[in-house]
Image (spheres, rainbow, N blue to C red):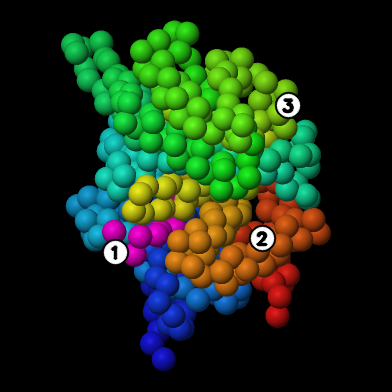
């Protein structure tokens, strides 16, 4: 039987079916959490071949001239799904974000971050269950900046009708497919009357098609953030432009235990990249203590996506097994340090594997 060797993890997976997915371990803690996730997937008997490709600093260290090698993009284009660890972006200087480039190049316009309370991870609120949907290609986050003259810089906020309508349609479809009942748009159109004004006008127009099915509301983002931390249970799906979505999704992750326990996915019309929401965490990289849950949960989202888009219901069942296994591990107090436990990355992976069905 053919075998695929994943060099950095020294893992050998049997090639037993056609699902192939790109794995980008990324930088910092990325390779550590990716190795743990691959081990859990193998133990859960996920019939998948991981095709390892690099991006970020890892790509450059591996000899590429680019932080986003053409071979990595080509692999995602060919296989249409990827699981991605974090990629470092230097602050205030240096190369621009690999994540921004990846999302733009592959047309991954819709970011989804489910935020769900986890039994065994005590936080201020117990029943948080919301989804942040973020426009992924425009706004200030696109990082279009210029130095006009020394000491004066500008940052361009681009909003287009096409992208604003596209993400609103995506959010309503996403909500409807999952039985969600309300979409709240966070905006600052009282000040940014044209750009955020366009965003909410498009969202409102799209909402008209869903009248009676999905409730729609608009909230000015500053007060909305206050409401979110006071009572997150009043929210269901939250729709935002790029920069607001970036900030609010981390805030929301903080409501359920932090960046280590929230998954993420980036969808376009052709490709989907599932990624940990946290960064490369240089403060703990190499120590073997990172929480692999964010990437694991993103991997489970990938299985659900493959189950639907490739008509492979078995993958949804395996995803459910992995989800019950990590839920039970957390309930039994088996946790990494970031959420109050003592386990290493690999010990937590073992705890999940022990709770998978035989
Ligand atoms: P970060 O998410 O890497 O770390 C923030 C804090 O959370 C740190 O104290 C870190 O130790 C902790 N943390 C993060 N993930 C954890 C995990 N899985 N387990 C336990 N603790 C965890 O954010 P930071 O420090 O702002 O960014 C570091 C680098 O990561 C930067 O270069 C940034 O650009 C990049 N980054 C990349 C992202 C991506 O590739 N999608 C997303 C966010 C940041």
Is residue 48 positioned above or below 298 on the image? below
Answer with mark 3 or mark 2, whichever residue precedes in sequence: 3
Answer with mark 3 or mark 1, whichever residue precedes in sequence: 1
Answer with mark 2 or mark 1, whichever residue precedes in sequence: 1
x and y, in percent, of residue 182 in the image: 62, 32
Q: Which numbered disc covers residue 78? A: 1
Q: Residue at x 54, y 56 (%)?
A: 301
**Residue that label 3 marks:** 231
**Quick one: which residue is furthest to the top in this view?**
191
Q: Which numbered disc covers residue 269? A: none
Part of the protein shown in magenta? 77-86
- Which of the pair 117/216 is nearer the observer? 216
Residue 56 appears left or right of 304: left
- Which of the pair 292/231 is nearer the observer? 231
Residue 78 appears left or right of 175: left
Residue 81 within the segment the image draws in magenta: yes
Q: Quadrant of the N terminus?
A: bottom left
- Could you give the CA–CA distance between mark 2 and mark 1, rounded to whole angstroms? 28 Å
**Quick one: which residue is furthest to the bottom in this view?**
1
**Residue that label 2 marks:** 323
The CB of the residue at mark 2 lies under 8 Å from ligand 1: no
The CB of the residue at mark 1 lies under 8 Å from ligand 1: no
Q: Residue at x 30, y 41 (%)?
A: 104
- Could you give the CA–CA distance between mark 3 and mark 1, rounded to whole angstroms? 43 Å
Residue 22 in sight? yes
State the SS at label 2. helix
x and y, in percent, of residue 16 in the image: 45, 83
Is residue 340 positioned above or below 354 on the image? above
The CB of the residue at mark 3 lies under 8 Å from ligand 1: no
x and y, in percent, of residue 11 in the image: 47, 76
- Which of the pair 341/180 is nearer the observer? 180
């Amino acid at each position: 039987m053919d075998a695929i060797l994943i060099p950095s993890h020294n893992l050998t997976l049997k090639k037993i079916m056609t699902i192939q997915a790109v794995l980008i371990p990324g930088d910092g803690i990325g390779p550590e959490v990716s190795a743990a996730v691959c081990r859990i997937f193998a133990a859960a008997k996920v019939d998948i071949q991981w095709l390892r490709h690099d991006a970020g600093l890892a790509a450059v260290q591996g000899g590429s001239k680019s932080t986003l090698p053409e071979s990595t993009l080509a692999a995602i284009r060919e296989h249409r799904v990827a699981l991605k660890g974090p990629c470092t972006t230097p602050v205030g200087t240096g190369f621009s974000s690999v994540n921004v480039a990846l999302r733009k190049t592959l047309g991954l316009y819709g970011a989804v971050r489910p935020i769900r309370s986890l039994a065994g991870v005590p936080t201020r609120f117990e029943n948080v269950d919301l989804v942040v949907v973020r426009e992924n290609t425009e706004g200030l986050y696109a990082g279009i900046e210029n130095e006009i003259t020394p000491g004066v810089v500008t940052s361009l906020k681009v909003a287009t009708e096409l992208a604003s309508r596209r993400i609103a349609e995506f959010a309503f479809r996403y909500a409807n497919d999952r039985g969600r009942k309300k979409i709240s748009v966070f905006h600052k159109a009282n000040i940014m009357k044209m750009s955020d004004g366009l965003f909410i006008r498009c969202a409102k127009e799209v909402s008209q098609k869903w009248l009676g099915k999905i409730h729609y509301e608009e909230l000015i983002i500053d007060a909305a953030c206050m409401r979110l931390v006071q009572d997150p249970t009043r929210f269901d799906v939250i729709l935002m432009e790029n920069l607001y979505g970036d900030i609010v999704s981390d805030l929301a992750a903080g409501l359920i235990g932090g960046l280590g326990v929230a998954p993420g996915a980036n969808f376009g019309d052709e490709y989907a990249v599932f990624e940990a929401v946290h960064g490369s965490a240089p403060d703990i990289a190499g120590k073997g203590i990172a929480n692999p849950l964010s990437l694991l949960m993103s991997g489970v989202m990938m299985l659900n996506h493959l189950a639907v888009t490739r008509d492979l219901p078995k993958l949804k069942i395996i995803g459910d097994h992995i989800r019950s296994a990590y839920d039970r591990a957390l309930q039994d107090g088996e946790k990494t340090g970031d959420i109050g436990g003592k386990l290493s990355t690999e010990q937590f992976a073992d705890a999940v594997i022990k709770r998978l069905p035989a």
